[in-house]
């Protein structure tokens, strides 16, 4: 599940359409616009400091896009790394950094999702 800021807040899960609890959850999610918000609030309450931090991360991400478009790849990467430090669960920022550093994993043939999972695990475990 991805929240409004593009952060991965719930890992992808398998959907078994024969499981009645799963079907009921999906029906509620599709029919009740407030249900997704409730799920997100259950996962992590949004407090003012995190909103401010996420806003700064989003701004730094956007600045990085402008810098990359201007041919300033190193400066763009620096901004994205600052953004990721502010919002380490932001899947979009992770993927942008990876795509620029490893274009072969994104733009040659199929996207290598297994590689992305390995990268994420390696980043979480540290250097």
Image: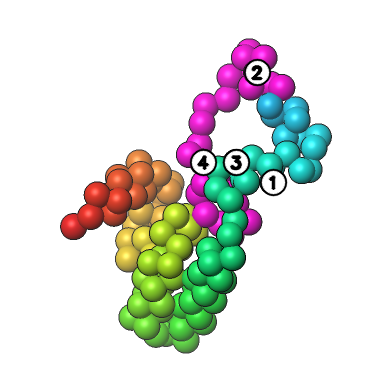
Q: Quadrant of the C terminus?
A: bottom left
Please tell me which residue is depicted at 46% across the width and 83% down the height of the picture.
Answer: 67
Q: Which residue is mark 2?
A: 21
The residue at 35%/44% (across/down) is 117
Mark 3 near mark 1, Cβ–Cβ under 8 Å? Answer: no
Q: Nearer the viewer, residue 105 or 122?
A: 122
Q: Is residue 13 left or right of residue 46?
A: left
Where is residue 125? Give x, y as percent.
24, 49
Magenta residues, start to end: 1-24
Q: Residues within 10 Å of mark 3 (few under 14, many from 20)?
A: few
Position of the N terminus by quadrant = top right
Earlier-in-chain disc, 3 versus 2? 2
Q: Which residue is mark 4?
A: 10
User: Mark 3 or mark 1, which is nearer to you?
Assistant: 3
Q: Of the residues tagged 1 and 4, which is closer to the observer? A: 1
Which residue does the numbered mark 1 point to in the structure image?
37
Residue 72 in view in this figure: yes
Query: Which mark sits nearer the N-terminus, 4 or 2?
Result: 4
The CA distance from mark 4 to mark 2 is: 18 Å
Is label 1 in a helix, a strand or a loop? helix
């Amino acid at each position: 599940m991805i929240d409004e800021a593009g952060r991965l807040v719930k890992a992808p899960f398998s959907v078994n359409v024969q499981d009645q609890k799963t079907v009921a959850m999906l029906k509620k999610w599709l029919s009740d616009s407030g249900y997704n918000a409730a799920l997100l609030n259950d996962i992590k309450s949004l407090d003012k400091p995190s909103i401010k931090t996420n806003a700064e991360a989003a701004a730094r991400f956007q600045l990085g896009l402008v810098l990359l478009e201007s041919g300033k790849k190193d400066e763009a990467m620096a901004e994205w790394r600052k953004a990721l430090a502010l919002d380490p669960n932001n899947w979009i920022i992770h993927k942008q950094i990876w795509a620029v550093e490893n274009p072969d994993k994104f733009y040659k043939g199929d996207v290598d999702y297994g590689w992305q999972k390995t990268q994420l695990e390696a980043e979480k475990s540290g250097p």
